[in-house]
Image (spheres, rainbow, N blue to C red):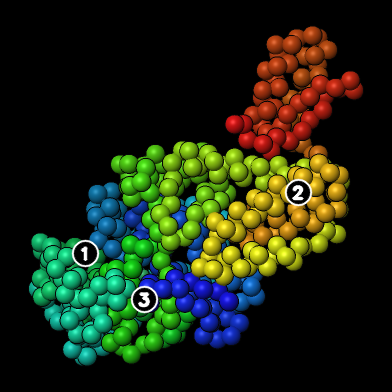
Amino acid sequence: MLRLFDTAIGDLVEITPMTSGQFSMYVCGPTVYDVAHLGHGRYALVFDVLRRYLEWRGLKVRHVSNITDVDDKILERAEAENCSPAEVALEFEEKWFLTMDKLGVLRPHHIPHATEYIRQMISLIESLIKADVAYVGEDGIYFDTSKVSDYGLLARQSLDSLKAGARIAEKEFKRSPTDFVLWKFSEGSSWGWESPWGDGRPGWHTECVVMSVDLLGEEFDLHGGGLDLSFPHHENERAQAAVMHYKFSRHWVHNGFVMVGSEKMSKSLSNFTTLDELLHSTDPRAYRLLVVQSHYRSPLEVNPQTVSEASRALARLDATQQRVGETGANLDEAELDQTELAAFADAMDNDLDTPAATARLFELRSRINQLLDDGRVAEAANSCVTMAHLLEVLGLDLKGIWNGEITAEVQGLLDERAEARREKNYALSDRIRQEISALGYAVEDTSIGQKIKKIFEMPE
Ligand SMILES: [Zn+2]
């Protein structure tokens, strides 16, 4: 049975789905005012792996992840770029999904947008005012955190210590530093929606309550996101849900930060400012492998060295699969190794221990090479199919086994090179060899002419 670390309990708990055979999860999505950074990529991958694993275990998962398209940062960018907030939001939402597609992150089943839920948010805020847990301040409507007896649960701190550590920012008119805005009055800005309290915009913490309950019901299995969301965002969601007597999320799961040189990832420190920059120079599968080789709750170190190690490890997996393919073994008839499947499930059930699961897959890879060295091809084929199957559960597809086909471009270069060699123009023939190599193929000259191979091993 799957056990995960539940932030609300502060310990590992057994995850029993609310409805047998099903699983409902809400993962807080991006605020679309800028391109995704490495931390976004990490949380998206962590919850993608969780979803894939649950589906592999036979659960029917319902995955909801929102787009926050109302936020002051969107407005600031729109003002700076002289366009509308909706245009900014649309631009960065499109970019977000392009990046997620590169990473192979499965689309959530529902992608609610905050702007589609304004009416429901107003209605929730009205209920909170009626329940006497919200008050009207000078610049907006605030939630009174002192009215929720266990406020601070997800921060694992008491209300008093949270108050002591917080301060009221300038231009905020709240009674306590932990109180949070539910509705912000529009000040001069034209961006806002009509409400019983005048034009304004909803606060961030209200949208996820409304959208999760609408799409998953008043009680659902899991609410997740990056560790930075546990407090205040998730705690503020939980506080509103508690007042409404929603059972709300049964479990709260958070992934750790991305670190660059042992400091929390930030633009100024990062070698890869954005996720796209990293993915431009690196196989997106390598970032996924790097993420799963680290435990989801641990800090993840991303630097050129860890990225290139992951790239090389990935190339070794690809190369082993290719080696098995080259034996001509019939992989369609190979059988999955049940012992390996069980060991994989054991590791994953233990708080999603993807580092242990992947370490075992690398051991399996070494065994496959040993089996091939010993000429035990059928066993190697079974192990290889098992390895590829389990990597797929982690969202990692190995490069398909090369069937010997090459593109017209490569064939053209091969023909040119053959001509150059006939003319003994070895300088030209070497240049063409380099061009072919840049396209991912190695040429060997044999007694019967040129022989071409796909390059799977990355250069050291
Ligand atoms: Zn949220």
Label disc, if present, on residue 368 of the rendered structure: 2
* Residue 39 percent across, percent down from the top left: 40, 54
Q: Residue furthest right?
A: 448
Instruction: Say if mark 2 contacts mark 1, CB within 8 Å.
Output: no
The amino acid type, in three-letter code, at marker 3 is: Ala
The residue at which mark 3 appears reads as: 8
Q: Residue drawn at (39%, 39%), measured in percent from left and top?
A: 271
Give the percent coordinates (x, y) of residue 29.
Answer: 41, 64
Is 316 placed left or right of 238 in the picture?
right
- The quarter of the rendering in which ligand 1 is drawn is bottom left
Q: CA distance from mark 2 to mark 1?
A: 64 Å
Relative to the observer, which residue lies in front, 392 or 432? 392
Q: Which image quarter is the C terminus in?
A: top right
Secondary structure found at label 3: loop
> Badges 1 and 3: C-beta atoms under 8 Å apart?
no
Label 2: few (<14), some or many (≥20) within 10 Å?
Answer: many
SS assignment at label 1 = loop
Q: CA distance from mark 3 to mark 2?
A: 43 Å
- Residue at position x 85%, y 48% in the image: 376
Quarter where residue 344 is shown: bottom right
Mark with earlier residue (1, 3): 3
Q: Residue at x 18, y 68 (%)?
A: 186
Above or below, 393 relative to 54? above
